Image: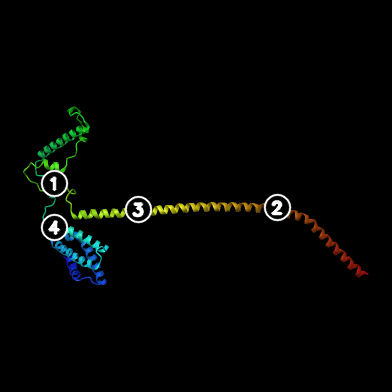
Amino acid sequence: MTLAATVHPESARVADTVPAGADDVTRARINTDRRLHRLETHLSTLLDDPDKRQWLALNVADLHQVLDKLKTSLSPNDPVLVNYAERLRRLQAAVQHNKASVGLPKFEHQAFRLPNVPHADLLAQLQQQVQRNRDAHEAKRRELLDLPSDATNAPTGSAALKSIPPPTLESLASASATSTASLRQRRLPGRDTRSSPINTADSKDVSEVLQMHDKMQDELVQNLASMASVLKSNARAFSHHLQTDLQVVNDASQILANNTARMDKEADRLKQYRASSRWTTCTLVLVLLVMMGVTAGMYIVIKIF
């Protein structure tokens, strides 16, 4: 009851407050969302205790009143109000389903009742039922295949066993219903055929989630297609640029080859100039030496005479 004591005063305060202004509407929406989240979180705990279950029903009714007051201030098609109404409907369905199942013994479904019979009698009845099912199945098969009804063409061994349908729970129950003794009523776990509003709501949620996933997959496919087209155009542009760069590299290689040939020609011409200028240098040196000798001789002659 600790949870009830912490939430119940808040519910009374919100229910008595009529959302008039924007601040009141926002506050009421926040409180309603918080209360719904708290009730959904502790739903299993609240349904186990009768007092807490009654308190949960009161809170659901109070939240319905708050939602009606919010509808006067907001649009009835507001997504927030639609979400709150759907969550309240689930909580109310859970409360009603729990009330309907209160007081019923566990595993009490009519389709799974098996009276208390001796094992030998039950085995004999099961064998008779299996034999009847086998004969009916074989007759139906021969009727569909237009086969003769003599016993010589009947399948034997593993073929006959494969043609036998598995016994159903209804056939087991009808075969053992002749005994007057009673057994504690049981049913197989996980095979309850009762449908509840919670299961309907869950199936609706699953369908909505599947629709959302389909829509998301369509959007992803469109995005992938657009990205594929962009990638294709980029690949074509990159290939074109590569071809342009290859042409530029080829042109540069041709220019470098031409420059290398010209430089070789200039090197040969410079070698020829150097060979031809070698004798000119020697002649110039000899002329300078002769002039220096003549000058020195003239100086000596002048000094002597």
Query: Residue under circle 2?
Result: 265
Q: Residue 193 placed where, x, y %? A: 17, 49
Q: CA distance from mark 4 to mark 1?
A: 22 Å
Q: Residue 272 placed where, x, y %? A: 75, 53
Q: CA distance from mark 3 to mark 1?
A: 44 Å
Q: Residue at x 25, y 69 (%)?
A: 25
Please name which of the two marks, 2 or 3, marks the residue nearer to the observer.
3
Q: Amino acid at mark 3?
A: Asp
Task: Label 3, secondary structure: give it.
Answer: helix
Please tell me which residue lies in front, 188 or 56.
56
Q: Earlier in the sequence, mark 4 or mark 2?
A: 4
Task: Label 2, secondary structure: give it.
Answer: helix
Please tell me which residue lies in front, 204 or 5.
204
User: Above or below — where is 26 with respect to 245?
Assistant: below
Q: Earlier in the sequence, mark 2 or mark 3?
A: 3
Q: Amino acid at mark 1?
A: Ala
Please tell me which residue lies in front, 217 or 284.
217
Task: Name the quarter where the N terminus is drawn.
Answer: bottom left
- Asked whether, in this view, residue 268 is left or right of residue 299, the answer is left
Circle 3 packing at 10 Å, graded few (<14), some (14-19), many (20+), is few
Q: Amino acid at mark 4?
A: Lys
Q: CA distance from mark 1 to mark 2?
A: 110 Å
Please name which of the two marks, 4 or 2, marks the residue nearer to the observer.
4
Q: Which mark is residue 218?
A: 3
Q: Earlier in the sequence, mark 4 or mark 1?
A: 4
Q: Residue 41 placed where, x, y %? A: 22, 61
Q: Earlier in the sequence, mark 4 or mark 3?
A: 4
User: Above or below — where is 225 with respect to 10?
Assistant: above
Query: Residue under circle 1?
Result: 111
Q: Earlier in the sequence, mark 1 or mark 2?
A: 1
Q: Are marks 4 and 2 in contact (CB under 8 Å)?
A: no
